[in-house]
Amino acid sequence: LISAGLSLTEAIELLRDGKGTATLKAVFTPLQTDLMAGHAYSICIARQVQHFSDLYVGVIAAAEEGGQLASGLQHLAHQLQSDARRKAQIQSALRYPALIAGVAALVVTLIMTLVIPSFEAQFAQRGTPLPWLTQQLIWCAQSLRTWGGPGSLGLLLLAFIVKRQLKRPAFRLFCESQLFRIPGYGHWLKTVYSAALAKTLHSLLQTGLPLSKALTHLAQAQQTLSFQRVVHTVHQSVNRGVPLSGALGASPLVSPLLPQLCRVGEATGALDTLLQSAATSLDSAANEALEKWTAALEPLSILILGLIIGTMVLAMYWPVFQIGRTI
């Protein structure tokens, strides 16, 4: 709408009066009120933290400062759409394994609470020594009957505490650092966030902002506290005269491809173009890795379920086979 020539106030009014949910209209109304009061768009959306992320506020603030609001909104739309597609892809891939895990948990619970006690009573009457695997299965069944309820409540309490603690920056940074250390998954996270960093910095530089000012807004637009700290460190290094490529390369969280292409961009004077190339390459690498993992989730979940059920059946009937051989 802005690219078509409408003012920001007119565009917001048109969106508010159009077809949409009550939640969207409830968002647009205070936005229009604040805009009519003379506030900048970035300030208006920053007041609604429950609806607009730091990425949204940071990009809009930079676009306003550079006088390229339409371009900033276009970049933001692409970034949010990319994140939504990746999230939907992950949710779709996890739906079937989650169903398998739920069925497995139900089957295991029923076997542990209903079937194993009868087997345990029969084995106790005979007084025959049980195989190690069967003993472990009986111990697990007894533990589940004894501690299943308190353990479930404890897990729910732990999840609640963790959710509350994630609001603390120090704890959130600790959790993010642990995620980045997970083999495979940590590398994928670094690739995704490095691509987002390159894409956002490219958009900020295209608005005409100098590099130092763009890095200021870039820190606010990061989706993780870890990468916010990375950008702050890079900003300080650039202000001391360190090239952007060297400052990015000093961080272990940044994918190596990004500082390499930045070095080429600095040498050729086409930094924004090379940043876009880095974002495209990193996005492609992240999507390819995600597709491979999602393709392997379904057979892997079936294999794990088969191993669990097969092990339990073997543990239950192994003593029966021994008794049959004895007879």
Image (cartoon, grey):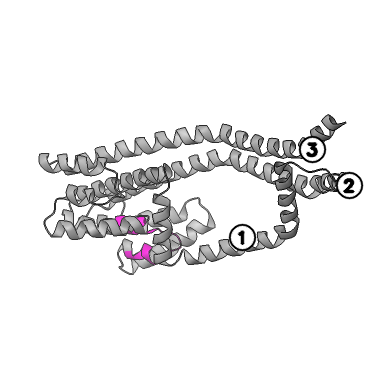
Amino acid carrying mark 1 in the image: Leu
Q: CA distance from mark 3 to mark 1?
A: 34 Å
The part of the image, by quadrant, that contains residue 29 is bottom left
Q: Is residue 5 visible?
A: no
Q: CA distance from mark 1 to mark 2?
A: 36 Å
Q: How many marks?
A: 3
Image position of 219 with respect to 168: above or below: above
Q: Which residues are magenta?
A: 43-60
At which x and y percent is residue 15?
A: 43, 53
SS at circle 1? helix
For the residue pair 243 and 327, the one nearer the viewer reads as: 327
Image position of 1 with respect to 100: above or below: below
At which x and y percent is residue 123?
A: 84, 44
At which x and y percent is residue 187?
A: 37, 43
Residue that carries the numbered disc 1 in the rendered image: 155
- The residue under the point 20% across, 40% down is 260
For the residue pair 291 and 213, the one nearer the viewer reads as: 291
Residues at marks 3 and 1 touching, judged by CB atoms closer than 8 Å = no
Q: Quadrant of the C terminus?
A: top right
Residues at marks 2 and 3 touching, judged by CB atoms closer than 8 Å = no
Q: Is residue 214 visible?
A: yes
- The residue under the point 78% across, 36% down is 317
As drawn, the label of residue 125 is: 2
